């Protein structure tokens, strides 16, 4: 076998069909079940998009009412999950807490060993409804605060913010959060979704697939990049007294230095998009609104400075994690909570792929070319 036959990282390899979403780097577009993600972000709630990803069609009013009622009924923090989370140190990474909670919810589910289409749909909705309470409570317990009960009169995004901060959020913040949830929901065969499909292909269960996917998402080359972006901002230094231009100048210098040292800067680059991530303009617009809402122009300075310096040096564009990180920071989330927010959203895409994999399964088992020692024998 020649070296070109080895597809390291499976780059450029098409491994299966999917009807869940279409990523087109040539037209810089992303469709969920045929709908442009920008249109969904502008016109839909995250609940409608979740329904779309799972059912293939947007819900009518009756379907949406029934679906949102199911989501609202499943929001309370599971008492066993709370006990397990409380037993973990507050130094545990929130992604580890999330992964553990997904596993506990799986072990406790009444349909744990049932992978029929009906059971998987129920498990997907239950897990999606349950995860905000885990993410919100974990941030609160690390701040020494108690659990906040969910509010049935609030939609998914408003309730998520309510359970995290214990204050009714203003509409602009809810809208920006809703946009982020929609943009993070699905992205074809990314590393975590592929992980979920590999696990599913062995005929394992939905919660095992999601638990493994959370592990794959944690890494900074994937979902962990939204947390890493904020570490970059912190390393440069956020100075509230600074003007946009002053912050941009310092950020440019930081980036030039990082690139001179051949560092990878998280939040930039993408395996599929080489001319910019289709979701960034919509997320950047949401970030701009949050910067205006909270009156924090220095963050825009840091954002612009890094982006411009990277573009000039390497023509590498930001990915979705770049605007999402500072948006979540402005909303008041702890930096380590950013990737769990991605989890809460991506549960929808992961489980849509789990159901698709079950419906048309083939064990995922690629080959490798052996390059270890020749056959030898124990003396
Ligand atoms: C929602 C998401 O999960 S989006 C992805 C989030 N991940 C990140 O932001 C992590 C930072 N980015 C990266 O590491 C990469 O761009 C990846 C992993 C996302 C995609 O990488 P790949 O397609 O495998 O490209 P690869 O890593 O080989 O990069 C190609 C070249 O661009 C450079 N490059 C790519 N991304 C970056 C970056 N963020 N900073 C600096 N250089 C970069 C590489 O160093 C490499 O340069 P070289 O050819 O001189 O060695
Ligand atoms: O597609 C990828 O490789 C990573 C990504 O942007 C995502 O999962 O949203």
Image: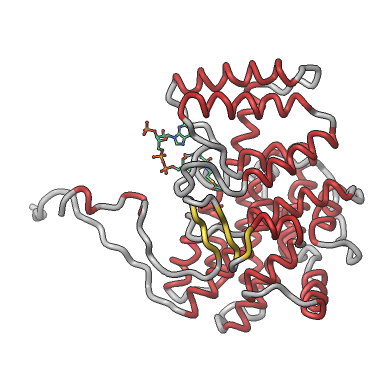
| Image coordinates for residue 267, horizontal then vertical, percent | 56, 38
Query: Splitting the image into 4 quarters, where does residue 250 fall?
Result: top right
Q: Position of residue 342 (x, y in %)?
A: 64, 52
Tell me the quarter of the picture where residue 284 sits: top right
Taking the spot 36% from the left edge, 54% from the top edge, the residue there is: 12
99 w.r.t. 297: above or below: below
Q: Does residue 135 lie above or below 290 as drawn?
A: below
Residue occupying image coordinates x 55% and y 64%? 21
- The residue sitting at 57% across, 16% down in the picture is 253
Observer-nearest of 279 and 325: 279
x and y percent of residue 160 in the render?
A: 80, 55
Q: How is the image coloured?
A: secondary structure
175 to the left or right of 274: right
For residue 294, side relative to residue 344 (left or right): right
Figure quadrant of residue 319 = top right
User: Quarter for ligand 1?
Assistant: top left
Q: In the image, residue 37 lies at what x, y percent?
A: 64, 57
327 w.r.t. 216: above or below: above
Residue located farthest toward the front when viewing the structure as drawn? 27
Image point 65% across, 53% down: which residue?
183
Foreground: 372 or 363?
Answer: 363
Front-lying residue, 264 or 94: 264
74 sits to left or right of 120: right
Residue 103 seen by the camera: no
* Any part of residue 154 in sight: yes
Which residue occupies the foreground of this view, 104 or 158?
A: 158
């Amino acid at each position: 076998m020649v070296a070109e036959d080895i597809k390291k990282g499976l780059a450029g390899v098409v491994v299966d069909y999917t009807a869940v979403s279409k990523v087109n780097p040539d037209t810089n577009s992303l469709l969920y079940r045929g709908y442009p993600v920008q249109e969904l972000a502008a016109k839909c709630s995250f609940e409608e998009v979740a329904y779309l990803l799972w059912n293939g069609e947007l819900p009518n009013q009756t379907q949406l009412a029934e679906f949102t009622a199911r989501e609202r009924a499943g929001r309370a923090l599971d008492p066993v999950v709370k006990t397990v989370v409380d037993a973990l140190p507050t130094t545990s990474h929130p992604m580890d807490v999330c992964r553990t909670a997904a596993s506990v919810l799986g072990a406790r589910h009444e349909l744990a060993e049932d992978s029929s289409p009906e059971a998987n749909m129920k498990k997907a909705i239950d897990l999606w409804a349950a995860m905000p309470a885990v993410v919100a409570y974990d941030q609160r317990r690390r701040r020494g605060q108690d659990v906040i009960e969910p509010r049935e009169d609030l939609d998914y995004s408003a309730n998520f913010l309510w359970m995290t901060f214990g204050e009714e959020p203003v509409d602009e913040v809810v809208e920006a959060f809703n946009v982020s949830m929609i943009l993070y929901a699905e992205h074809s065969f990314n590393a975590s979704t592929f992980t979920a499909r590999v696990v599913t292909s062995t005929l394992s269960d939905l919660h095992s697939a999601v638990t493994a996917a959370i592990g794959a998402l944690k890494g900074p080359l994937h979902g962990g990049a939204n947390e890493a972006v904020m570490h970059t901002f912190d390393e440069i230094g956020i100075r509230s007294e600074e003007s946009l231009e002053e912050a941009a100048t310092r950020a440019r210098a930081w980036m030039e230095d990082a690139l001179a040292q051949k560092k990878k800067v998280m939040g930039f680059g993408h395996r599929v998009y080489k001319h910019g991530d289709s979701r960034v303009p919509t997320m950047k617009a949401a970030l701009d609104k949050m910067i205006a809402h909270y009156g924090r122009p220095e963050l825009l300075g840091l954002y612009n400075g890094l982006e411009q310096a990277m573009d000039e040096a390497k023509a590498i564009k930001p990915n979705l994690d770049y605007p999402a990180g500072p948006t979540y920071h402005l909303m008041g989330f702890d930096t380590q909570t950013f990737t769990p927010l991605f989890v809460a959203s991506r549960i929808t895409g992961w489980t849509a792929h789990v159901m698709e994999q079950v419906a048309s399964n083939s064990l995922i088992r690629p080959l490798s070319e052996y390059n270890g020692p020749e056959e030898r024998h124990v003396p």
